[in-house]
Amino acid sequence: MKKISIIISFFFLASIITAQQNLVPNHSFEIKDTCPENTYPDSPAHFAKDWFEIRNSPDYFTVCNNINPNYNVPNNSFGFQCPANGSSYLGLYTFVSPSLNGCVNELAAAKLNDSLIKNTKYYISYKVVGSNGIIGFPMQYATSKQGMKLFTKKPTFITGSSGDIYINNFSQIYTNQVISDTLNWTTIKASFTADSNYKYVSIGSFFDYANSDTTKVYNGNGINSAYYYFDDICLSTDSLICNINIQTQCLIYTALNDYNKKNSEEISVHPNPCNEYFYIKGIKNTLKWELLDIESNTIQSGNVSEYESIRINDLPESVYVLQLYTDKGVLRKKIIVKH
């Protein structure tokens, strides 16, 4: 009888440990099944271990030796972005203008480490940030409704209009906020009580054009779509587990600190994209500025007053990082040079 109770206790303890872990495998996409070195023009989501495509062609971005530059980190064909965690992330279209035959939402999925327990409360979080655009052409739109959807059975890959079965204006977790930030990762957090023993999780937007808030954020010559990077996918019974710390390995800058998040709106940089000059309207305590290229080299620097003009007509088209040093910290802005 004593031996039986020990066995029961062991399995009870094991179930608690399992429930308290992050149930999402390879949650920040660091483990690679394939390194997209010679896979031009594609780097599909299934290159990240445990993940697979279920609608159209979500992309995998990571650091590899001699990587295909279209899917590198931090600089790739969809823009410039440091990971929220580690050195990899996924990228998905969440909207394409109706003029291009409507929504072509891309979706990726993974099998959970363990099935959810019905009537149990779970905490969930993920990080999302908008793409700068394709090869210097900004994305014209930002959308809401990015989220996570759970399935009891493995969702199969469907492309084209047949894939609309997944775009049914429902997912267990989504945001009503239009995510327009292309510099800082936005963390979405929520909790819910499982109504089924779900076994699979998927990410993307499961809402059609009519049921999403879609904002045009750029009126110039750009890509009439919305595209987002996703990182740090978490699902657990423990809310602390889904409060993942940012540990980026970016080549240019580490995670933005609280000072940057609270004060970045005090600086205005325009026009952006730019081709001859850009202007900084900065905060009064700015001490100096630096302009960095994608390899973290300082290519220009100087002191800044409340209003500063910086000439960039001799710089090649690319994405740069403007660093403004203040007496309290460093503020950073992305600068797109397009001639």
Image (cartoon, helix red, strand yellow):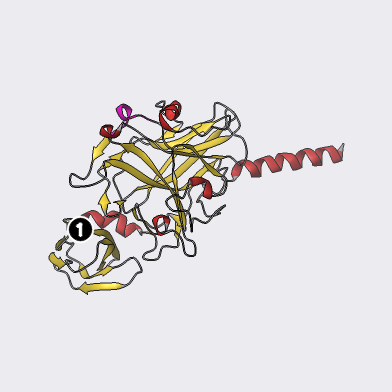
Q: Is residue 267 visible?
A: yes
Judging depth in this view, the residue of 318 and 278 nearest the camera is 318
Q: Is residue 306 visible?
A: no
* Residue receiving disc 1: 267
Q: Is residue 10 left or right of residue 329?
A: right
Q: Is residue 188 above or below residue 285?
A: above
Judging depth in this view, the residue of 320 and 305 nearest the camera is 320
Residue at image position (49%, 46%) is 45
Could you say which quadrant of the image residue 119 lies in?
Answer: top right
Q: Is residue 121 left or right of residue 15?
A: left
Q: Position of residue 121 (x, y in %)?
A: 54, 33
Q: Is residue 288 above or below residue 24?
A: below
Q: Secondary structure at mark 1?
A: loop
Q: Position of residue 284 (x, y in %)?
A: 17, 65
Q: Position of residue 1 (x, y in %)?
A: 87, 36
Judging depth in this view, the residue of 198 and 121 nearest the camera is 198
Residue at image position (34%, 33%) is 103
Q: Is residue 155 left or right of residue 100?
A: right
Q: Total number of numbered labels?
A: 1
Name the quarter where the C terminus is drawn.
bottom left
Q: Is residue 247 a member of the stretch shown in magenta?
A: no
Q: Read off the magenta span.
A: 207-213
Identity of the residue furthest to the right in this view = 1
Could you say which quadrant of the image residue 100 lies in?
Answer: top left
Tag 1: residue type? Ile
Q: Position of residue 104 (x, y in %)?
A: 37, 35
Q: Is residue 127 above or below residue 288?
A: above
Judging depth in this view, the residue of 184 and 103 nearest the camera is 103
Residue at image position (34%, 69%) is 296
Label 1: few (<14), some (14–19) or many (≥20) C-alpha neighbours in 10 Å: some
